[in-house]
Image (cartoon, rainbow, N blue to C red):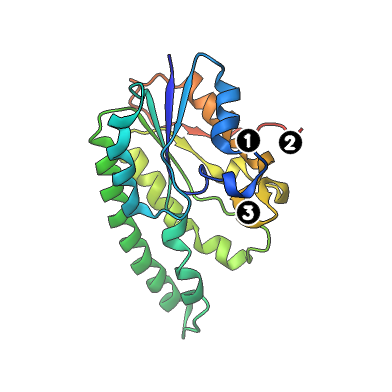
């Protein structure tokens, strides 16, 4: 029996932003069916350094996990948005700033991934979505170096990837009360993509495959 554990931040822990029963974990339970288990250890507001403590709670769960799905990193990038408004003298100087922030993010991401992989349970990771309503095109482009880190680290460890950029592409995929969180529609698409990964990707398979087929909105 599958037992999927969700780690990370409000991408999975979005109950505050949608109607009861429409949160990602509940929709995933519906997607996977009664024979599967879903446990939510992700917490709204978490950053990369918080995930190790979430993974440490696996022993508290009623059944051993068959998959750990991690979506985290967006809250580490969020504080940089103000800094990205700072004027610079050249495009190269801006690129150097991004490179420095990317290096810090990579160190934190590697530490997080090492802690999760040490649990010796199959792991999949998610990218940071970039179609948030109102997000300036320049900021959307600036997210690419951080997603590059996630993809590189996943490939280095032969992990499957949920590409949230492909899953949540419509404004309706984001909660009206907080546009950086998944809406009920976005949660449905996330649940469908996770379900596809769990069904199609054998846990013992050491291969990076990107999953990102969005479910229909209706």
Between 63 and 156, the residue placed more toward the observer is: 63
* The C terminus: image quadrant: top right
| Residue 155 falls in image quadrant | top left
At horizontal 45% and vertical 69% (from top left) the residue drawn is: 80
Q: CA gap, disc 1 to disc 3?
A: 14 Å
Between 95 and 186, the residue placed more toward the observer is: 186
Task: Label 1: state its secondary structure.
Answer: helix
Task: Label 2: state its secondary structure.
Answer: loop
Residue 84 x %, y %: 49, 74
Task: Label 3: state its secondary structure.
Answer: loop
Q: Considering only vertical position in the picture, is 97 above or below 49?
A: below
Pick whichever of labels 3 and 2 is earlier in the sequence: 3
Q: Considering only vertical position in the picture, is 1 above or below 218?
A: above
Per the image, the residue denoted by label 3 is 131
Query: Mark 1, residues whose alpha carbon is within 10 Å: few (<14), some, or many (≥20)?
Result: many
* The N terminus: image quadrant: top left
Pick whichever of labels 2 and 1 is earlier in the sequence: 1
At horizontal 51% and vertical 64% (from top left) the residue drawn is: 142
Per the image, the residue denoted by label 1 is 189
Residue 86 x %, y %: 49, 81
Per the image, the residue denoted by label 2 is 217
At horizontal 51% and vertical 49% (from top left) the residue drawn is: 10
Pick whichever of labels 1 and 3 is earlier in the sequence: 3
């Amino acid at each position: 029996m599958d037992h999927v554990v969700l780690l990370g931040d409000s991408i999975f822990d979005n109950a505050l932003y949608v109607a009861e029963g429409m949160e990602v974990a509940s929709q995933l339970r519906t997607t996977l069916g009664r024979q599967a288990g879903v446990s939510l250890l992700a917490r709204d507001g978490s950053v990369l350094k918080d995930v190790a403590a979430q993974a440490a709670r696996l022993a508290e769960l009623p059944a051993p996990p068959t998959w750990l799905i991690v979506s985290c990193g967006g809250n580490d990038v969020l504080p940089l948005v103000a800094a990205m408004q700072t004027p610079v003298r050249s495009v190269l100087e801006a690129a150097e700033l991004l490179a420095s922030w990317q290096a810090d993010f990579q160190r934190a991401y590697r530490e997080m991934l090492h802690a999760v992989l040490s649990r010796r349970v199959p792991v999949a990771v998610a990218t940071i979505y970039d179609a948030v309503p109102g997000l300036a095109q320049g900021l959307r482009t600036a997210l690419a170096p951080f997603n590059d880190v996630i993809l590189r680290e996943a490939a280095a460890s032969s992990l499957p990837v949920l590409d949230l950029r492909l899953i949540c592409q419509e404004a309706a995929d984001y909660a009206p009360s907080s546009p950086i969180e998944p809406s009920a529609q976005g949660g449905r698409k996330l649940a469908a993509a996770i379900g596809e990964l769990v069904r199609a990707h054998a846990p013992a398979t050491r291969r990076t495959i990107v999953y990102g087929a969005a479910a229909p909105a209706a």
